[in-house]
Amino acid sequence: MTVPRKRVIRFRINRYESHIMSLTTFRTLGRSGLVVSPLALGTMTFGPGEWGADEADSRKIFEAYRSAGGNFVDTADIYSGGESERLVGQFIRETGSRDEIVLATKFAFNGSASPLTATREGGGNPNAGGAGAKNIHRALDASLKRLGTDYIDLYWMHIWDGVTPVEEIVQTLGDLVRAGKIRYYALSDMPAWLAMKAATIAAERRVPGPIAIQVEYSLVARDVEAEHFPAAGEAGMGVVPWSPLAGGFLTGKYRREDTTNSGRLSGANPFGQSKFADRNWVVLDTLRSVADEADRPLAQVALRWVMQRPGVASTLIGVRNVAQLAGNIAALEFELSDDQMSRLDAASAPEPGFTAGLAAPMIRRMVFGGNDVSGWLE
């Protein structure tokens, strides 16, 4: 039973990603009945902050996304100190769209000493963070209050804390599904083995399991292809990439000779200087060539590449104004050719690790007596 289910998922993923789309080119998220748009509206920018959007601009972004047919809205308890959740909930109430919206939020970062503020050094309550049952219940109740709703459609573990047993995470989130406080749950920023173990425990115990994983994925961040993508496909979890434009690097606004005063990556940011690695500038050159050929902005081509990759279910986008949103949505309106995809794939190919070579043609020939053997649907 396991093998056929795995192959059906791969076929469906490949089928809907390689053609012109819109926000109403809906698909199910993983092996579930949750129907989402191909682009999810990330709302980390909703609320105060140097790169944030005020209430008026946030409302315009939300309304523009909804007007274009989008239904997948993603926030988190930590965004803007909870203000993002409050705004999202307010906009949903104002538009009477709760039944139409797939509302996603997250837990795990500490609610008493946020890593996004200057007050994070010591003194925080350790049980106000992490993936333990105590914090999950605390975080969910607080999110429901800020959002002004009595249930969450998709509840993400924002990051694994490194200590909570997988069994406890599955038990706690599964209980919340059965209680009706959340409809589904999923996992973000975790080791591939943890996601696979969670899915396996849930399947064996016949209890609700994770339906998706959320990971950084872009032309300059492809390491998750080695373990996370195969694990997601095997377990029936959709992949939801975050930062498909690599924090803005793939928009082309940064110059190799001087990266200062150009955008978010020029100052303090979660990526540090990692996006300015030598190999990334080579990727950017190929991206620029393909973008010129397609007569599209670099950002749209980079985003479209992510959407056309096998395994990607819905891609998170984050914007500060309606113009940026329109530009991202426009990435749905064209298709990269096989040749263009191949060139981008080749330029951005990650260094193969240990597991990448285990099923290489040479190894297979060694195993199968010098014969070339193809697997099911290869």
Image (cartoon, helix red, strand yellow):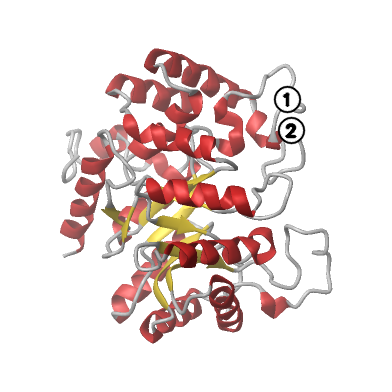
Res 96 seen here:
yes
Position of 201 relative to 100 (above/below): below
The answer to which image quadrant residue 261 occupies is: top right
Residue at the spot of label 1: 259
Q: Quadrant of the N terminus?
A: bottom left
- For badge 2, the amino acid type reads Ser
Which is more toward the observer, 106 or 228?
Answer: 106
- For badge 1, the amino acid type reads Thr
Residue for point 30% across, 28% down: 335
Residue for point 60% across, 38% down: 247
Residue for point 47% across, 32% down: 327
Tell whether 312 sits left or right of 131. Answer: left
The answer to which image quadrant residue 367 occupies is: top left
Residue at the spot of label 2: 266
The answer for how far apart the CA atoms under marks 1 and 2 are is: 6 Å
Within 10 Å of disc 1 (Cα), the crowding (few <14, some 14-19, many 20+) is: some
Q: Quadrant of the C terminus?
A: top left
Tell whether 273 sits left or right of 178. Answer: right
Which is more toward the observer, 351 or 120?
Answer: 120
- Look at the numbered discs 1 and 2 and tell me whether their residues touch, using CB distance below 8 Å: yes
The answer to which image quadrant residue 277 occupies is: top right
* Image position, residue 206 (x, y; %): 28, 80
* Image position, residue 285 (x, y; %): 53, 17
Q: Residue 173: which numbered mark, if any? A: none
